[in-house]
Amino acid sequence: MNSSSNLLVLGATAQVGKLVAKHLKRSEANSSAGSRRKENLKELADQFGASRSIDLDDPRTFDQALKDVAGIFLITGYTLDMLVQSKSLIDAARRNGVKHIVHLGAFTTDRDAYATVFAWHQMIEIYIQASGVAWICTPTCSCRICEGMPRSRVASTVITLPKLLGIPLWKM
């Protein structure tokens, strides 16, 4: 199911990633949905136009999944594993010439954040920044800006935020 899509959406089988993938399909963007479960690839391709096999717990899957990819929507689960998964994927993105990463993070203005999830996201964001790959980090629904928003509005914010900031993330 590895077509020449140039935007890879992770988390397309869950809530926010699925909404991002739907938005990209409606926008006729050249994109694909990533999944670790090979049995989901056909359904994802039918739903979103293309799919790619990628398992964040298996970095050996990254190079094939990132072939001809210009941008990644990076979303992970909230466990300590997210640090290794994100670091490995960022390294593979740089190695494979990915131009942009949109990271769904946890927003805090406090650089001395001690809440575990905020600290983890800050570490990932600093690593993305240090990688040299262009990036933007968008807040999760847990931040005050998104509280009470319908999930579709959050996904729309993830997609439009770069435009509002005047940051061209990738060519569609």
Image (cartoon, grey):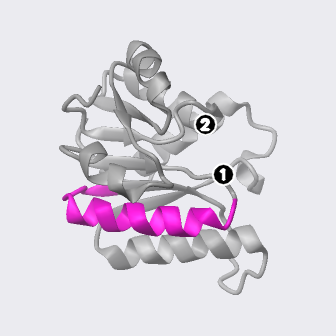
Q: Nearer the viewer, residue 46 or 130?
A: 46
Q: Is 74 displayed left or right of 77 in the figure?
A: left
Residue shown at the point (70%, 80%) measured from the top left:
110
Q: Badge 1 local density, few (<14 within 10 Å), some, or many (20+)? A: many
Q: Residue at the bottom extreme?
A: 112
Q: Is residue 51 magenta?
A: no
Q: Is residue 130 above or below residue 49?
A: below
Judging depth in this view, the residue of 2 and 149 nearest the camera is: 2
Q: Is 41 above or below relative to 83?
A: above
Q: Is residue 164 left or right of residue 170?
A: right
Q: Which residue, given by chain and number where applicable, does mark 1 sit on?
A: 140
CB atoms of marks 1 and 2 within 8 Å: yes
User: Residue 33 location, x and y as percent?
Assistant: 41, 32
Q: Residues within 10 Å of mark 2 (few under 14, many from 20)?
A: many
Task: Report how far apart the C-alphas of labels 1 and 2 lie in the structure.
Answer: 9 Å
Chief secondary structure of the magenta portion: helix
Residue named by callout 2: 16
Residue 167 is at least partly visible in this image: no
Q: Which residues are magenta?
A: 79-100
Element assignment for label 1:
loop
Q: Residue drawn 73% across and 31% down?
A: 150
